[in-house]
Image (spheres, rainbow, N blue to C red):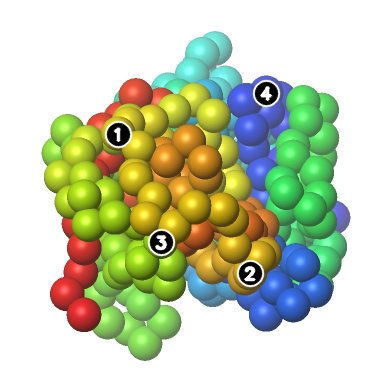
Amino acid sequence: MTAGLEVVDAGALTTVQDQGRPGFAHLGVPRSGALDGPAAALANRLVGNGPAAAVLETTATGCVLRATGPLVVAVTGAACPVAVGPVLGGSVTAPFGSPVRLGRGQTLEVGAPTQGMRSYVAVRGGIAVDPVLGSRSTDTLSGLGPAPLATGDLVPVGAGAPAAEPEFTKWRDRGRRGEAEQDDGRAAPATDAAPATDVTVLRLRLGPRDEWFTPRALTVLTTATYTATGDSNRVGLRLTGPPLERAIEGEIGSEGMVLGAVQVPPSGEPLVFLADHPTTGGYPVIGVVDASGLAAAAQARPGDAVRFEVLPE
C-alpha cells in the first residue's frame, strides 16, 4: 500500500493545488491552482516530482501531517518553522526549503509563517486525489476539486520512485544552494516567498478600462500606498486606501476577467484577482498585474503595505 498523510491539524485553510485548470473560463470555471506558483514548483523539484504534481497549500497558520509510511517531503513558500516528531520523545527542527525524510508515524509540523502568507508542502509522488477537469486543485469559489483539508482526513500520495541516498542528497544540496534544477537541467532560483522590503510592489499594465478613471486616479494608483485587508482570500487581494476617482459613472456590462486583473468596485479601492477569481465581472478593470508579481500578491498579509507601478507599454 502506498504511504499517505493523515491530517492531524488542518490549520486555517489547507488545500490541494497544482498548476490549475486553465482553458475553462468560457464554462465559468476559474483557473485555480497554487497562488504562489514558483514556490509550489520549487517544492516539487526538491522532492524529485514533475512540475504538474499536486502539493498542499497552507494559509496563515500552517498544518500538522502524519506519515502512514516512509515519505520524502519539502516545505517552501512563506518562511515558517518546520519540525518532525516524535523524535526522542519530542519534535526536532527540520530544514525549510529542503527535502526531509519521514518515517511511518512521524509528523511534519508546518508552523505559522514568520513572513508571507502561504507555504507549500510537496511529497515525493505528489498528492494523488482524483483530478477534476484535468486538475487536482481545490477551487474555493466554484467548489470544484477536493474539499479543503479537515482534521482526520487521509490524503493519498502517488507512488514515486524510491528516494535513494544519492538522489536525496542531490535534492538536499539544491535546497542548501537555494535553487533547484528546472526540467531542462538549468538552475532555477528559489522563490522569494515574501516581499524583501516593507512594501509589496505590484507592477501592472494599464487597461482595458483605464479610460473610465480620471488622470488624477491614475496618479493616485501609482503614488499611494494601500493596505492588504483581512478580507483577502484565494479569490482576490483586497486593499484599503485612497479611492480611485471615476471619469465615467455607471457600470459596464459583465465581461471576462483574467488572473491579476485590478478591478475597482464602487468603493474605489482596488481588488487584485488571484487564482480562484470569477471568470466575469461588472466593475471596470484599471490594469492587470504582471505575472511576475502574482506570487508577491499571494503572499501579502493583512496589514502589509502594497503599491502599484505601471509598466511601460
Q: Are marks 1 and 3 in contact (CB under 8 Å)?
A: no
Q: Residue at x 80, y 44 (%)?
A: 147
Quadrant where the image shows the N terminus: bottom right
Front position in the image: 175 or 39: 39
SS at mark 3 in the image: helix
Residue underneath mark 4:
9
* Residue 69 seen anywhere in this rendered image of the structure: no
Residue underneath mark 2:
255
- Mark 1 vs mark 3, foreground winner is 3
Position of 266 compared to 129: left or right? left
Alpha-carbon span between mark 1 and mark 3 = 17 Å
Q: Mark 3 or mark 4, which is nearer the start of the sequence?
A: 4
Q: Mark 4 or mark 1, which is nearer the start of the sequence?
A: 4
* Residue 52 seen anywhere in this rendered image of the structure: yes
Alpha-carbon span between mark 4 and mark 3 = 47 Å
Q: Are marks 1 and 4 in contact (CB under 8 Å)?
A: no
Residue underneath mark 1:
242
Alpha-carbon span between mark 1 and mark 2 = 25 Å
Alpha-carbon span between mark 2 and mark 4 = 40 Å
Q: What residue type is disc 1 on?
A: Pro
